[in-house]
Image: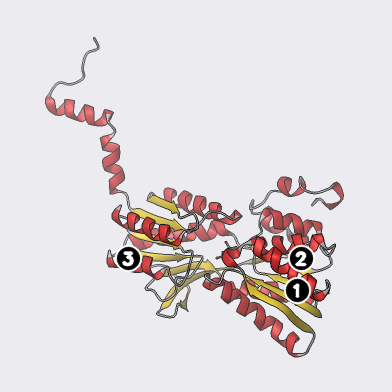
Amino acid sequence: MTKSPCRSTVLCAIFAAILNGQFVLAQDTNKLKIGFSIEDTKGERWQTDLNSFEMRAKQLGVEVISRDAGGDADRQFQQVKDMIKAGIKVLVLMPRDTTKASRMVDAAKSANIQVISYDRLVMNSDVDLYVSFDRVEIGRMQAEYLAKHAPRGNYVLIAGSPRDEGAKALHDAQMSVLQPYIDRGDIKVIADAYTKDWLPSEAYLFMLKAIDSTHGQIAAVVASNDGLAGGAIQALREHNLAGKVAVSGQDADLAAVICIAQGVQSMTVYKPIVNEAARAAEEAVRLAKGEKAHADGTISNGWIKVPTIMLKPVAVTKDNIKTTVVKDGFQTLKSINQALPADQQIK
Ligand code: BGC
């Protein structure tokens, strides 16, 4: 029998506690807890947001409770209530429906928990901070590029989810650029709609109809993100129009960057989301420690002026894939090139 290191009941109790990991547990419960609630991690970008947030929070020594609601607004509400019970100090919230999400903010605030609205702005609520990319700038970049390269002809606008306030902000910004062209009669908007849940399949069907009604006479598609662009490009491919119609996007998804290299998508807007997630984690820790967030502006959510951090988006075309998304390690040359024939590869 091995000799027990216990010389007294106190030492024995300490030894048993170490073996049981109770000391580690005691230390962990002292850590600040931050909640990260995301409505859905489907769609290329969102897993990166979640991973980057968790990584930065870990570096900062806080514990993250993260939950993915799988696209269900009621489940997201329940998950937020569970996080509140689990003792989070700050809630970082990426909501499914930016109007209905105020119930989650209310629940958090009544438990004295501060809330950061992540990427999407929670309307009519007391959120403490909004961290995102400049949506007006993104919408402008998309429309300006298209108007420059296709200054005349029929335009199709495919906007995001009507439940995402940001989708409207993008659409308004795009229209502000296109309006003078429309007024001059150079550009004609022949189809313009929001798409349920930003679904590429909706964009595909919408595009088929637009092609049909114009007999393929389309100059440009203002697709608000890369998923929607992908749906539209599929319809264009089926009518041998891919590459002949200018198409915008957003997110610098791998499939979109490949389409840009192939010449069937004109541009995308790259948002360094690793920075967005890291910034949200840093601000969450600041708030959890009772410090003030480092915002650089405000935005109205219909109720208050929300302190805001708006990061800078970057327009990506065939010419700068290497110096933007590849340089940052957001996409790799290998994964882009392996989808392309030798003559289209990026050197
Ligand atoms: C984000 C976009 C994303 C879209 C669909 C928006 O709220 O800002 O980057 O493409 O949701 O997931």
The x and y percentages for residue 265 are: 76, 63
Q: Are marks 2 and 1 in contact (CB under 8 Å)?
A: yes
The kind of secondary structure element at disc 1 is helix
The residue at which mark 1 appears reads as 146
The residue at which mark 3 appears reads as 107
The x and y percentages for residue 178 are: 71, 82
Q: Amino acid at mark 3?
A: Ala
Q: Amino acid at mark 2?
A: Ser
The kind of secondary structure element at disc 2 is loop
Depth check: give the residue in front, 168 or 92. Answer: 168
Q: Nearer the viewer, mark 3 or mark 2?
A: 3
Mark 2 / mark 1, whichever is N-terminal: 1
Q: Is residue 93 above or below residue 187?
A: above
- Alpha carbon of mark 3 to alpha carbon of mark 1: how far? 43 Å
Q: Amino acid at mark 1?
A: Leu
290 left or right of 329 in image: left
Q: Are marks 3 and 1 in contact (CB under 8 Å)?
A: no
Q: Residues within 10 Å of mark 2 (few under 14, many from 20)?
A: many
216 left or right of 75 in image: right
